[in-house]
Amino acid sequence: MSSNQQSDKSWQNADFRSVELLRPQVEVTHAENGIIYVSQAAELPEYGSRITERLEYFAKTKPDQVYLADRGEDGEWRKMTYAEAYQKVRSLSQFFIDQNVSVERPIVILSGNDLEHALVSLAATHIGVPSAPISPAYSLVAKDYARLKDCIDAVTPAIIFTNDVDSFTPAIAGAVADDIPILTTSKATSGRYFAFDDALKTPPSQAVDRAFSKVDGSTIAKFLFTSGSTGSPKAVINTHEMICSNAMMTRDAFTYFKDESPILLDWAPWNHTAGGNKVFYMALFNGGTLYVDDGSPRPADIHKTVRNLKEVSPSWYFNVPKGYEALVAMMEDDEELRQGFYKNLKLMWYAGASMAQHTWDDLERLSVQTIGKRVVIGTGLGATETAPGAIYCTWPQNITGNIGLPVKGLTLKLVPMDGKYDARVKAPTVTPGYWRQEQLTKDAFDDEGFYMFGDALRVADPEDYNQGFIFDGRTAENFKLNTGTWVATGALRNQFINYFGDVVNDVTITGADESFLGALVFPNHEAVRKMANMPDADIQDVLAHADVRDFFQQKLQALAANATGSSTLIRKLILVDVPPSLESNELTDKGSINQRAVLNNRPHLIKAIYSNADNLIAITK
């Protein structure tokens, strides 16, 4: 964005595009011990207990409408209607029954997002058997298959599905027992391998209907894996009630879905709850269409998203903040892309990390430039354990940070903790626990049965709780300086990124048990190369350039002048040349950073900050 665009805020006076969204009204209860309970005054509408009832319903009521679409090998859209999907799901369901699948012996999915992945997941769900999608990165990026093997061992599958057996062969050889059959789209039937097209020819029997009739809200629909910075991934139980109730909570919040089935274009991986639960079932529950975006925010893939947005104009759009940043950069000089993106768009949704204010401003500015109105930008708070949506902000804001209010059917519990409120929730969307992990399950809930997020919140307006809540960092990531002063890393990290703008991709705050705060800064390589006028140089040489170091020195000094004390004063930083690693669990598939993993994996950088290394950038006294 140019300096003129930064100073000209006239677009902020534009009206918002008309859209019907929920404006919650909450009831607040203050307990004597300082705990606060918040819930919506209105009740959640009925939502059913079997998610594939919606597939059956729309196969009958709108059989010819496109339900799912992805890019085929020829680059064209492969489209599948509701009727076609239902027929294929029933055939696959019979195939899985013939393979003796069960809750104890579910179906593991090693695949990116595509039609076949969707059908496998829906077929398993239809007959009351869990599927377990595992991050492709554990197979295709990792140098060893320890995490993949941990996931597979955790659920003991009866069968593995992969959409690309050639790519996954090394991982299968390294992590999958020889006696587990493989269902695949890319290898003819031989030995342990079954051809997907042959499975689709399986004639469904009454066994499929009998299995479906036994499904209820408590039936496990899938296992989704989650983990912290250390330890093996945990299999989070996702039941039909969790998915159905969350789909209704989402439909109720995005009220316009009641009259307008959503058109979605989405890349978020289905092994994560945002893509695999919220977006995937949003289309199914509301009779919408989901186009699988084969792009991503990464520089190597963003051009695919651009191509897709020129062909598909979504009415609801999700991305992580880094994805929106990448999209903004592409839209600045591409009117066709802007027209395609904003044409039918009524709500932009982000999650996975906080959005920088400059990204928010750019999205609104480009919206006004394109359609003459702003489009509402919303976010919320959720977790794999909450299916995921728990708190949504669905009314217009001018700045980032407000995550909204609890959805209908959920109670938010706020527990005073170190000057903040620790967020906990209870709802039909909350998991019963971690598969075969009794102690981990027990540790995740408090004595009243509320799931503990590990996130801190504060009230946007203490006089009016209906104004929502502000995300106040991860309580699990906060730490104390050696003076005993608490540091809210989430808020400080957001402040840092907003202050430095698009020159910084991310930052990790250091200082636990130290006398002052430091920062490991991951710069935007393209931006610093332009700053140094070194487009082809080694990134280490770029970061050592005087212009780059002077820029960061001046910005750090100016940021320090606004600090309110030791808990907000960053004294030193290091420009890190190696970006966060997906393989080392520093970066998720969605592009958000795991700060604890960065600190665990790079102790030499932390040591450098507190030993006055030569490459430091520090404030002057």
Image (cartoon, rainbow, N blue to C red):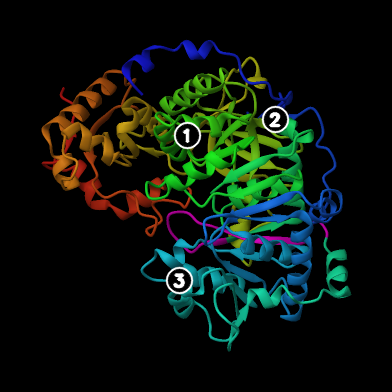
Disc 1 residue type?
Answer: Ser
Point out residue 585 in the picture as x, y percentages from the top left corner. 41, 56
Question: Residue visible at 48% across and 48% down?
Answer: 590
Disc 3 residue type?
Answer: Ser
Q: Which mark is residue 441?
A: none
Q: Mark 1 falls on what kind of element? A: loop
Nearest to viewer (mark 2 / mark 1) = 1
Residue 505 visible in rendering? yes
Q: Earlier in the sequence, mark 2 or mark 3?
A: 2
Q: Which residues are magenta?
A: 216-234
Q: Is residue 535 left or right of residue 481?
A: left
- Badge 1, how many Cα within 10 Å: few under 14, some, many 20+? many
- Badge 3, how many Cα within 10 Å: few under 14, some, many 20+? few
Please give the residue where the numbered disc 1 appears in the rendered image.
Answer: 354
Question: Residue visible at 82% across and 33% down?
Answer: 43
Q: Mark 3 falls on what kind of element? A: helix
Q: Who is closer to the viewer here, 504 or 163?
A: 163
Question: Residue visible at 67% across and 35% down?
Answer: 412
Please give the residue where the numbered disc 3 appears in the rendered image.
Answer: 167
